[in-house]
Image (cartoon, grey):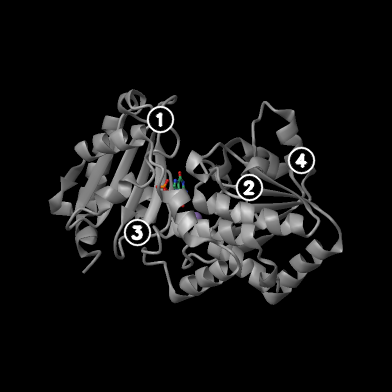
Amino acid sequence: MTKKDFSEIKELLQSSSKKIVLIPHKNPDGDAMGSSLALYKFLTNNNHKATVLAPTSYPKFLHWLPNNNKVVVFNKRNQQTIQILKDAEILFFMDFNDLNRIEDMKEYIDESDAVKIMIDHHQQPSDFADYTFVDPKVCAASQMTYHFLENLDVANEIDYDIATCLYTGILTDTGSFRFSTTTSTTHRIVADLIDKGAVNHKIHNNVLDGNTMSRMKLMGVALNNLIVMPESKTAFITMSRKELKENNFEKGDTEGFVNMALSVEGVSVAALFTEDLDHDFVKISLRSKGVFSVNQLSRDNFNGGGHINAAGGKVDDSLQNVVELFKKVVSENKEDIIKSEL
Ligand code: 5GP
Ligand code: MN
């Protein structure tokens, strides 16, 4: 985005109080909620009427975030939540780049004449926003939000809540500052967020500890189901509906399981297949190390996308068929996967 774009946005935000809606992607994660709630706080501090409108609910381990109690979950049967969208003068799209990622809310966006601003870090953004602030090299939408505030010359307005939310987003999307997207700039920003009030050890504690017994049991099931395909440096885990139900699955419980598969010695590509509890589809989480793009793998085969090393998708088929499809696709890509980390 150009300097001119930023001065236009600045003018828009400074001219008068606006009705603003911030939208994270469905099943929002720490980065989607962190970036949305950070910008929410900045905008309300500046006398705008802002609402974070989430397409679906999200895991309990994010409910401690500052202003979480102000988040509204969209429901197409609830006229009030539809009205919030219809009334919006500015829409922010946080941590996603395709309207398919917000489910039922999509149709209202198409109709809306609000100014649309995307703040994201995924590859290949769709062209639906008036302003697209995207850098796929950046580790998190929360880091992009920091840069967004920098470009508006208001980084000095980052308060305790904003710093806490942005820190959380960067922490969760970098796997605690370990993925290759974590740069020296990321660390400088995180240092600044600590200076501005983020209490790092408390945030780590809030996000990463507090495992319930049912999650620990599910982890046991996941590890038991782990399958390694050494010839193609790939590992995967399946979680059936039955296994999830038997272990009192709650949203967010399987977060990070795919990384256990990726941590196996010699593995460069990992997948987690989760059968949906209510519908006949399978959610797929993909991770890779090195240059092999699971974003491309997901776009080509699993109706999804994401980043080079972390992507997801969804297939309307049985768990067994999706696993078979995955094995076939992996075999076809074997050479590239083997070369990925060399
Ligand atoms: P996760 O495996 O944690 O659900 O998702 C990893 C990354 O893949 C997310 O940051 C998101 O960018 C992307 N992703 C996950 N699911 C989907 C999907 O269904 N469609 C697209 N386009 N991207 C997804
Ligand atoms: Mn993100």
**Residue at the image position 60 percent from the left and 68 percent from the top:** 196
**Mark before the other along the chain sequence, 1 or 4:** 4
65 vs 51, left or right, is left
Looking at this view, name the residue that lies furthest to the right: 16
Amino acid under label 1?
A: Asp
Work out how far the residue at label 4 is from the one at label 3, CA to CA, in angstroms. 38 Å
Q: For mark 4, give the secondary structure.
A: helix
Dot 3 or dot 1, earlier in sequence:
1
Percent position of residue 298, x then y: 38, 49
**Mark 4 or mark 3, which has the lower sequence index?**
4
Residue carrying label 2: 23
Foreground tag (2 vs 4): 2
Which percent across, then down, holds residue 24?
59, 48
For badge 3, the amino acid type reads Ser
Residue named by callout 1: 276
Tag 4 or tag 2, which sits nearer the N-term? 2
Mark 1 falls on what kind of element? Answer: loop
Residue 59 visible somewhere in the drawing: no
Some atom of ligand 2 lies within 8 Å of the CB belonging to the residue at label 2: no
Taking the spot 49% from the left edge, 47% from the top edge, the residue there is 29
Alpha carbon distance from label 3 to label 1: 25 Å
Is residue 101 toward the left or the right of residue 81 in the image?
Answer: left
Residue 278 percent across, percent down from the top left: 44, 24
Q: Which of the two marks, 3 or 1, is nearer to us in this view?
A: 1
N-terminal-most mark, 2 or 1: 2
Q: Are marks 3 and 1 in contact (CB under 8 Å)?
A: no
Asked whether the residues under the numbered discs 3 and 2 touch, taking CB atoms below 8 Å apart as contact, a structural biologist would say no
Give the residue pinned by disc 3. 293
Neighbor class of circle 3 (other Cα within 10 Å; few <14, some 14-19, many 20+) is many
